[in-house]
Amino acid sequence: MAVLDCGGFRAAAHRLGTVPSRVSTTISRLEADLGVPLLLRSTRSVRPTEQGQRLADQIRPLFQGIEAAVSEAANSMATVRGKLSINVPGAVVPDILPPLMAEYRRLHPEVDVEIVVENDRVDIIAAGCDAGIRYGAHLDKDMVSILIGPRTQQIALAASPAYLAANGMPEAPDDLTGHAGIRYRLPSGTMLAWRLRQGDDVVTVEPRSSLVLDVDAGIAGLAYARAGMGIISAFRNWCERDFEAGTLVPILEACWMSLDGPRLYYPSRFAGAPLRAFIDTCQRVSARG
């Protein structure tokens, strides 16, 4: 597992506190005992065979279970220690995650926290993370989830006063097709759709794309809207300060769509003490409103 995770014998030996020759000898002995090759070696790289990859996929959760058990034993005297790694989308980074992390850090200062920002759906076990946060993510059968942050979030439309003075205020969803839009694109290449309510129906509109941003740009997209480059579709909670300051103006507010808030998901088994403590923090903060 160390060789696969580190990408080579030398790096694995450093992680394990031994020498490369011992790592190589141990794997050769393991291959001889099993009767199948586990790693393909060259002078420049190491990669698993089909049998090696299958074995790694099957034993990784077992190793994580051992680590969780050891962590639980180490934290049995009330003080939580260790590492917590969470894989999150950029959408929760500006405002939903900080109060949770601040409260968690206040209660458990001896836990090292790592936040990995990715917007694609991620296998958190393969990624080496303890938990993930996603919107409406399909969960594998061995995962559980809890709601964090707001129960629902609205998707707002907004533009600067200068843009609206020059181009007019849209009065209906169809009007948006004649306006410049600041759009977000997923890593897969798919453009995030603009969906709005129109009476009892949900409609999709396609504005002219004045600017396309990778979804990783997140809340930074608002700066382009403030600069007058067009109308942006973004989380309402991102826009609230601009609405209050008048730097952005809400558009077609009655038509805004809502979606379920983000959820924390994690393996149903082997939750170590740092993760269990974070789950407790999320539930406590959520209960406060």
Image (tube, grey):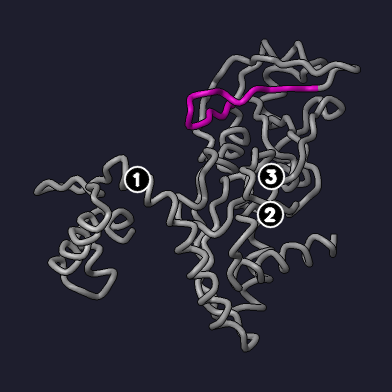
Front-most of 227 and 3?
3
Amino acid bearing label 3: Trp
37 left or right of 161? Answer: left
Amino acid bearing label 1: Gln
Dot 1 corresponds to which residue?
A: 53
Does residue 236 lie above or below 194 as drawn? below
State the residue at coordinates (23%, 54%). 31
Does residue 75 lie above or below 156 as drawn? below
State the residue at coordinates (70%, 49%). 263
Front-most of 274 and 104?
274
- CA distance for labels 1 and 3: 42 Å
The N terminus lies in quadrant: bottom left
Mark 2 nearby-residue class (10 Å; few <14, some 14–19, many ≥20): some
Dot 2 corresponds to which residue?
A: 96
Whole-percent x, y for residue 119 in the image: 53, 40
Q: Which residues are magenta?
A: 182-196
Precedes in sequence: disc 2 or disc 3: 2
275 left or right of 202? Answer: left
Dot 3 corresponds to which residue?
A: 238
State the residue at coordinates (58%, 39%). 223
Whole-percent x, y for residue 257 in the image: 79, 30
Front-most of 86 and 37?
37
